[in-house]
Image (tube, coloured by chain):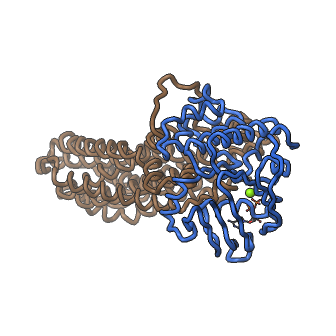
Chain colours: A blue, B brown
Amino acid sequence: MLEAKNIFKSFNNGNVRVLKDVCLDIAEGDFTVILGASGSGKSTLMSIISGLERPDSGTVTYNGIQLTALKDKELTDFRRKYVGFIFQQYYLLPHLSVENNVRLGADLAGNRNYKNIIKSVGLEDKCKNRPFELSGGEQQRVCIARALAKQPKILFLDEPTGALDEQTGRSVLDYIVKLKNLEGFTMVMVTHNQNIAEMADTVVKMNSGGITEVYKNSSIKSAYEIGW
Amino acid sequence: MVISLKDGAKLISVSVICFCAVFVCTFMLNFYLDLSSISGISDGKILAVYNAQLSTAKITSALAGGFLGLIAVLMTFFYIKIYIDSHSKQLGILKALGYGNFRLAIHFWVFGLSVFIGCIAGYAGGFIAMPYVYEGLAVNGIPAVEINFHWQLLLGLVFAPPFAFLFISFGYAAIALKRNLGDLLGAKVLSQKIKPVSKSYKERSFLADMCIKTISSKKLIVFFVAFSCFCYSAMVQMGFSMKTMNASLMGVFILLIGLVLAFTCMIMSVTSLINANRKNVAIMKTFGYKPAEYAVAVFAGYTPFALLGFAIGTVYQYGLLKLMVNLIFADVGEMPVYKFDVALFFITLLTFIALYAITVFLFSIRLLKVSVKEVMI
Ligand SMILES: Nc1ncnc2c1ncn2[C@@H]1O[C@H](COP(=O)(O)OP(=O)(O)O)[C@@H](O)[C@H]1O
Ligand SMILES: [Mg+2]
């Protein structure tokens, strides 16, 4: 479904070489975790395979569309149609209600059913509140709703529980996986937390800009079964 | 401490406003003082002209000084607020370490410096322009007015305003810093006191809601946008009208000051809007919103206020010119009648719409450059 081939990426005119010849295959409906120490290039890789950034060389192909050959405008269209994002920092719009933050995603897909999504992340009572009136875990759940309301084919998550305590982190992960199984989208999650990798179908290990290991989990654990 | 001279440099628009105000006040008040020292005019008709000139000088300085001074104060508040908002974490940490509001507020002295720079430049400019003003205002029958130096103007226009601003900024900063430490460290949006969910909650599409909330969360920008358009409308029309009324020199000054004010305020507003919305635009970009869409979300809400400012400006300049002609120059025979210039109005309106569209377009390009990386750190 999503295929990256020989990706190279550097910053500061080639002085900081972040990705070195990365190849990656993501299957439809799969839950892939990209695991690696902080600074290993996970976020950079994610931004390239999700069409946010361009590699210096190499190709990214999504169901036959070669992202690396698209113009900026077409790349925007690609993200609009297919991709959802959840980041460590929530980046909710501070002046807008929970509902309208979710509509940021919903309106793009013409999704009138966003109220149900807000309900499914357990925030129907806080629909009209603004983000700063919510706890961290609740804010991250708004982000989940915002991303899912867009009905993405593939959801990218960059350390989604990085800013949360253990209990909240578990419940947020639990929500995400439950909704994934319900909707059946593809999911790519970046994390430095080894335990979270036990929840994934496929684990991609990264170390200083390269992929060192790819394996499939034989048994998949829930958010409450893993260590933290 | 966290406030640097570079932060002060951002206050350039305050300097520009102060420059305009002091520029006009310098030659107008100087003229007023020199003119009022003339005595012994007995001819009734000439006395009327003389009195009319005195009133014009008084009114112009009062309007320029008072009005622009007020705008400069508002702008300073606006900048201090933006500064505290965007540095809330740093300031919060300093407060947590035991710095008092007072000790932090003292550092806002930099904000008074920009006023001083504007004032001294305005004063110098006023003196350079003075011979031409005196020449332009000369009237047959009244003895030629000599340029004299008045030390009280130097004090009042150059040294007093920065001190006043120093105290005003300091006071405002001390009040604005009196926030909950938790609020500062949590970087909550200062402009929003936590209000209960409003009863008038309406369901709107995301873009429409964002338009409206951008406005309501930055009300001072609404004012500055409207003011900018007001200046353009009022001062361009007034400037050209005065030209046709044989007051070309004053007309040119008004025109120039109007343009400077309009552009300064507009650029300041648009720049702070962009800075305030960087993160919002970045997240919209990652989700696949198009440039036209986020430009609309950030800017479109201000258009009605821009037009309102323009309309008020038109009415204001009409009223003011009418008043000047009818009241001040009532006794002066050969003063031309003032009529509302419809053609001028339409030309001003058209150029206004064109300039407004171009400004918004040019600054939308800056939104394009907002990197999606900003949400990934
Ligand atoms: N825009 C950039 N400019 C310069 N260096 C960057 C930039 N983005 C990332 N890097 C560098 O690339 C390396 C990998 O970053 P990142 O992909 O964020 O790692 P991870 O997400 O695994 O922590 C880091 O050393 C970081 O400093
Ligand atoms: Mg990262």
For image coordinates 86% across by 42% down, the residue present is A226
Residue at the extreme front: A218
Residue at the extreme right: A227
In the image, is B205 to the left or to the right of B256? right
Residue B196 lies, with reference to residue A134, above or below; the image says: above
Residue A164 at x, y percent in the picture: 77, 41
Residue A65 at x, y percent in the picture: 54, 65
Residue A191 at x, y percent in the picture: 78, 53
Q: Which sits in the foreground, B345 or A1?
A: A1
For image coordinates 73% across by 54% down, the residue present is A32
**Residue B118 visible in the current orientation:** no
The image shows a total of numbered marks equal to 0
In the image, is B40 to the left or to the right of B231? left
Residue B80 at x, y percent in the picture: 60, 46
Q: Which sits in the foreground, B40 or A182?
A: A182
For image coordinates 52% across by 58% down, the residue present is A78
**Residue B13 visible in the current orientation:** yes
- Quadrant containing the N terminus of chain A in the rendered view: bottom right
Q: Which sits in the foreground, B6 or A124?
A: A124
In the image, is B350 to the left or to the right of A150? left
Ligand 1 falls in quadrant: bottom right
Q: Which sits in the foreground, A3 or B81?
A: A3
For image coordinates 78% across by 60% down, the residue present is A204
Residue at the extreme top: B199
